[in-house]
Amino acid sequence: MDLSPAMWISAVVPLTLACSACGGRLDADRAPGSGLPDAQSTDAAAPCDGDGWRRFDAQGLFEFRAPCTFEGGASDGIDSSVGAYQAAGIAAAYDYGAFFVNFDGWEAHQSFTKVATTLDGRPAFLLTAHDLAPAYGYPYLVAVVVPAVDAHGTKLSFWGSADSPERRALLTQVLKSVRFG
């Protein structure tokens, strides 16, 4: 079951994640019991390092480094492990499981790039696009996709949007910092 990022966000993480009117807060219009992470908590976040960044443990499946201003954590997925994070001008989410999040729609947008790379030694793709604000909250998009995290074919899709090219560059650093356990 491939989902587009917009479908995933609307099905798993309501668009309040990227709501500019609510300041991008994960919890701005969250209904009690919705299963969304509490924006005031972190997903097993380590203390801040001297560089203003810290390590986030995503349910023991992988970890990444992000600025200490990142908030969020894991949520209940249906057939995968999912999570969402936010910081000023940035919204991000991941899906770790048997299926990809489908980013095919990004190809039709301005400045689309798809670059083969590696992420913690595994083949991956880095995707960027611009101008999808209505679906993603912010216009500058970036994603990493790892088609095979392990021998079972587990996949990681980790993507987000930012309100400026500078914040997209910061988010790209976050996504590229993924390390698997």
Image (cartoon, rainbow, N blue to C red):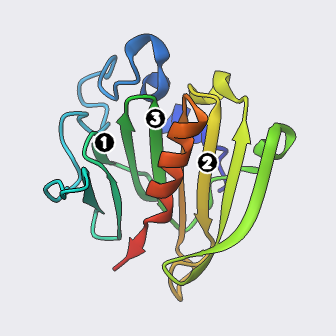
Residue 90: mark: 3
Kindly give the residue lying farthest to the left in the view shown: 47
Q: Which residue occupies 25% across, 33% down? A: 39
Q: Which residue occupies 67% across, 44% down? A: 4
Kindly indicate whether the residue at mark 1 contacts the one at mark 2 (C-beta within 8 angstroms): no
Kindly indicate whether the residue at mark 1 contacts the one at mark 3 (C-beta within 8 angstroms): yes
Q: Quadrant of the N terminus?
A: bottom right
Residue 142: mark: 2
Disc 2 from disc 1: Cα separation: 17 Å
- Counting residues from the start of the chain, the first of labels 3 and 1 encountered is 1
What is the three-letter code of the residue carrying label 1?
Phe
Q: Quadrant of the C terminus?
A: bottom left
Give the residue number, with chain letter if any, for mark 1.
70
- In the figure, is residue 45 to the left or right of 118? left
- Counting residues from the start of the chain, the first of labels 2 and 1 encountered is 1
Residue 124 lies, in percent from the top left, at 63, 72
Q: Which residue occupies 13% across, 56% down? A: 47
Crowd class of label 3 (few under 14; some 14 to 19; many from 20; radius 10 Å): many
